[in-house]
Image: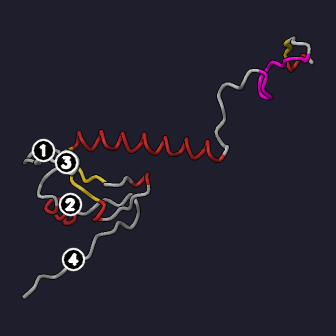
């Protein structure tokens, strides 16, 4: 007699937490080791389920995208994922021309000062 093949768990929403049965399956699939550090997770160690590809970076909330992770390693990886998401947003904004410079170029249209043809500098609002 063969065992029943279990279907992969897929969260209904990105915020849906994995049920205990899925936590156990993921833990056993990784042999009780942290997916980030590779260290064995001992009894009493605090651990979470981590998305291999972060949801913010396009990952899915499904069993195949989960790995067990020690709390400290998970915290560090999440910080790296957030930093990557921020960088991606900045690069995309700049590419699309949405990025606004905090300091305008001297003499540029957004600058408060304007250089006259004779070489003098005047404030734009005093013209």
Report how far apart the C-alphas of labels 4 and 1 lie in the structure. Answer: 28 Å
Report how far apart the C-alphas of labels 2 and 1 lie in the structure. Answer: 15 Å
Query: Is label 3 in a helix, a strand or a loop?
Result: strand
Q: Is residue 55 magenta?
A: no
First in residue order: circle 4 vs circle 3 = 4
The x, y position of residue 71, in whole percent, is: 22, 43
- Residue 110's image quarter? top right
Q: Which mark is residue 47?
A: 3
Is 20 in front, or is 85? 85
Query: Is label 4 in a helix, a strand or a loop?
Result: loop
Q: Which residue is mark 2?
A: 23
User: Please, which colouring scheme is shown?
Assistant: secondary structure
Q: Quadrant of the C terminus?
A: top right
The x, y position of residue 95, in whole percent, is: 62, 45
- Looking at the rendering, the stretch of residues picked out in magenta corresponds to 107-117
Q: Is residue 116 magenta?
A: yes
Mark 3 and 1 residues: CB-CB less than 8 Å, in contact? yes
Q: Which mark is residue 114?
A: none
- Residue 27's image quarter? bottom left
Is 90 in front, or is 117? 117
Furthest toward the front, the residue is: 118
Judge left or right: residue 42 versus residue 63: left
Q: Which residue is mark 1?
A: 45
> Which residue: 12% across, 82% down?
3
Judge left or right: residue 37 versus residue 96: left
> Which residue: 32% across, 54% down?
51
């Amino acid at each position: 007699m063969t065992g029943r093949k279990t279907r992969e768990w897929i969260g209904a929403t990105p915020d849906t937490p994995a049920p205990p049965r899925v936590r156990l399956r993921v833990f056993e699939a990784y042999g009780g080791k942290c997916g980030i550090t590779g260290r064995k997770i001992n009894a009493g160690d605090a651990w979470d389920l981590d998305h291999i590809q972060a949801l913010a970076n396009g990952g899915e909330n499904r069993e195949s995208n989960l790995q067990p992770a020690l709390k400290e390693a998970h915290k560090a990886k999440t910080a790296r994922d957030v930093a990557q998401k921020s960088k991606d947003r900045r690069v995309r904004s700049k590419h699309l021309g949405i990025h606004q410079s905090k300091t305008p170029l001297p003499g540029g249209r957004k600058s408060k000062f304007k250089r006259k043809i004779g070489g003098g500098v005047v404030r734009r609002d005093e013209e």
